[in-house]
Every structure is written in structure tokens, then in C-alpha cells.
Image (tube, rainbow, N blue to C red):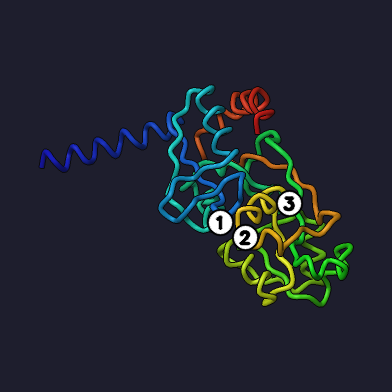
Amino acid sequence: MLRILIIILNGLLISAAQATCETIRVNGEHNWFDVSFRENSQAPLQGLAVELANQVFADVGIKVDYQAMVPWKRQFLQLETGDLDLIIAAFYNQERGEKFIFSETIGVEYSSAFIRKDQALNYNDVTSLMGKRGLQILGSSFGDQFDSYAGQHLTISEMPDLDRALKLVALQRADYLLYATHGGRLKIANTEYADLLVDMQPSISRQLIYMVMSKSSPCVDHLQDINRAIRRYRDDF
């Protein structure tokens, strides 16, 4: 009986801490090199957005509780249901804007179509992607304008894993991969495809990056302080 009471009391203490935002439950994309990523499914989340989040919430006085890896789409579902407080880095689109609360901008990201170098002459702008086999990471968004264009004119399959997607392009089983320009370049430079793959220019989109918070999170009450800390530390992003 005593053991049951202790378990109940511990649960109440955890709920109380969350209700007053002493602790914030956080997650992020595990394929977004080098913004937020994991070396494997059991590895901790790391990257520039993690470093920024640690600085921001230490400044505000909120303990960060990084959650285990779950798929990107499921993280947004958890935000919607209140089972997650914050995604540390994400792009804005209209659907997300209607459901969640966005912080001040934490950074900017360009995205590109990554292709084989020997096919570069066949690409010059987004219209060059029509009729070709495209890939993107599961749950990716490149802004309302490009997403709308892609839905009407492009053939794009979603992949859960960045390494697998790069391999498919390298082996010519797909024609291009849509991915963050800077992160893609860094990732490819450390793979066997360094001399094989390149990003098409110009970029397909330029998007601002935000922290995204659940509307039901008690930490919403600290948004002003969080934004103030973001302004203080985002130059390090």
C-alpha cells in the first residue's frame, strides 16, 4: 500500500512540475543534419538547435527533458495532444501555424535538390524536377509555396532515413533528394558520395526556423522570456 502511495505521489509531483513549467518536454527532427539529429535511434538528440535550446531554457530557468526518438510526424501529433511541449526547430507552414505557437526566429535555412554531378546539366530550376523521381525525408515541408507546387507538378516519395535517401540518388534509383542545403553539404562531405552528389542551384526555398510549442503546454506562459533568451543567443545558431 505504501509503495502504491509513493508511486501516486511521484506522479503528482511530476504533473505539478509540468503544470508550472519547471520542466519542458522537448524533441526534434532526427534527420536534420546539423540542426537536430541523432547518430542512431538510441543516441541523444544533438545539433545547433539543441545547443541553442539548452542555452535558452537555462537562461529562463526551465529544465529540459529530451524525449526518446519518435517519427517527425508523430512529434507534431504529440504537440497537438499536449504530450510534447516543444519541437526545438521546425519550419512554418499554414497548417502548423493554425495548430501551434511559434517562437521568434532562431535561424534561416535554404533547401535544395541534391543530384548526381554527372546529371547537373539537366537541372537549372524547380521546373527541371518535373517528370523525375524525387525523394524527401518523411514529414518534410519546404514552405507553402513550394509544397503546393510539388503537390501539383512533382513526383516525390518520402523516406524515413537520410542515409538511405542519399544512397538511392547515388545509385540512380531516384533522381533527386530535397533537403536542407547546408546540412546536406556537410553530410555528403563525410560520405562515400562526396565526389558524386551536389546540390542544384538556385535553392528551392528559403525558410525561417522556429521553436514550435504546443498550445496546451504550461510553458506558453513563459513565451516572452523564451523569446527574449532566443534574441540573446540565436547569433550562435
Residue labelled with disc 1: 72
In the rendered view, does 115 fall on the left or right side of 75? right
Quadrant housing the N terminus: top left
What residue lies at 67% left-to-right and 64% top-to-bottom?
A: 136
Q: Earlier in the sequence, mark 2 or mark 3?
A: 2
- Give neighbour class at mark 1: few <14, some 14-19, many 20+ (Cα, 10 Å): some
Disc number lying in front (3 or 1)? 3
In the rendered view, does 199 fall on the left or right side of 101? right
The numbered dot on residue 139 is: 2
Residue labelled with disc 3: 181
Instruction: Give the image location of residue 17, x and y in percent.
Output: 38, 31
Looking at the image, is 136 positioned above or below residue 83? Answer: below
Q: What element does badge 1 sit on?
A: helix
Q: Amino acid at mark 2?
A: Gly
Looking at the image, is 155 positioned above or below residue 221? Answer: below
Q: Amino acid at mark 1?
A: Trp
- Give neighbour class at mark 3: few <14, some 14-19, many 20+ (Cα, 10 Å): many
